[in-house]
Image (cartoon, rainbow, N blue to C red):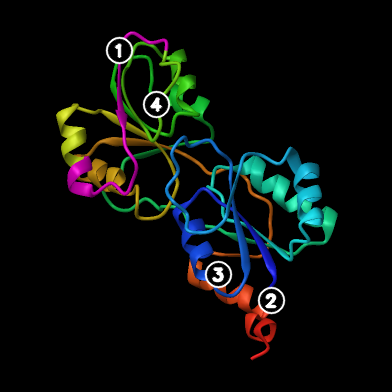
Amino acid sequence: MKKILILGGTTEARQLAEKLVEDFRVTLSLAGRTESPVAQGVPVRSGGFGGNEGLAVYLRETRTDLLIDATHPYAARISANAAQAAQMTGVPILALRRPGWEPVDGDRWTQADTTGDAVHALGPAPRRIFLALGRQEVAAFEAAPQHHYLIRSVDPVEPKLAVPDAAYLLGRGPFREPDEHALLEEHRIDVVVSKNSGGEATYGKIAAARALSIEVVMVRRPFLPEVPSAETVEALAAMIDHLLDPVAERGV
């Protein structure tokens, strides 16, 4: 059976791995940033590779036949390393690229290129901010200590922000719009700060903000390398079948 390495960390990566495991030898690689990841259902490798050269060594040593980048849309460094390692080794690479959200009527979006730009977009006057960015990015908001922050993450934020007024929530999506609506109202949120992650699991806060006419500061996606890609698990699985032909591998 052909060997596939999936660089994961998203729901779609897990779904893809489960879809491929009957026809291929699948390993799912997780960066290890989440303390208690969801059970994946396939063999898992946790931790980094040591940049593009380390990943290239791994691909050669394991004789991997296909590399799939199914990381989070904001994992730009990992995606760049994957593209470079594929080029160094000649291993084919495909990417699963979830489409981003687009503003619709009623949305009040302020676009920001970086998390630092999002901090500046909040302005000098104290406001009640819902940070739905993940624990890796929230430290930048220490530069604006005048705001009240409600911070939600999968794992605890450690150390906590050096600001005088912050509250913390632990939660793992999906998050339903009615629940997000209630959360924004309960905490009297003025601004939601979000990445444009795409997908349905975390869109509830965006829909709730629209219904409540709350501003959303949306951090744009980073540049990702151009590799053959698909937007859905089903479309990428079809590309993989065409590339590796599991029927031929089984001798059917």
Q: Does 244 appear in magenta?
A: no
SS for dot 4? loop
For label 2, the residue is 244
* Badge number at residue 165: 1
Distance from disc 2 to disc 1, alpha carbons, whole Å, reads 54 Å
- The total number of labels drawn is 4
Q: Position of residue 151 (x, y in %)?
A: 34, 27
Asked if residue 231 shows in the view, the reply is no
N-terminal of the pair, mark 2 or mark 3, is: 3
Q: Decide if residue 239 is on the left or right side of residue 60.
A: left
Instruction: For the C terminus, give its image quadrant.
Output: bottom right
Instruction: For the N terminus, give its image quadrant.
Output: bottom right
Residue 28, quarter of picture: bottom right
Distance from disc 3 to disc 1, alpha carbons, whole Å, reads 47 Å
SS for dot 1? loop
> Looking at the image, do the residues carrying marks 2 and 4 touch, with CB atoms under 8 Å apart?
no
Within 10 Å of the Cα at label 1, are there few (<14), some (14-19), or many (20+) other Cα atoms? few
Closer mark to the observer between disc 3 and disc 1: 3
Query: Which residue is painted at 33% across and 49% down in the image?
Result: 203
For label 4, the residue is 156
SS for dot 2? helix
| Magenta highlight range | 162-180
Query: Which residue is painted at 51% across and 57% down in the image?
Result: 13
> Looking at the image, do the residues carrying marks 4 and 3 touch, with CB atoms under 8 Å apart?
no
Q: Is residue 141 above or below residue 203?
A: above
Query: Which residue is painted at 22% across and 48% down in the image?
Result: 177
Q: Position of residue 92 (x, y in %)?
A: 74, 64
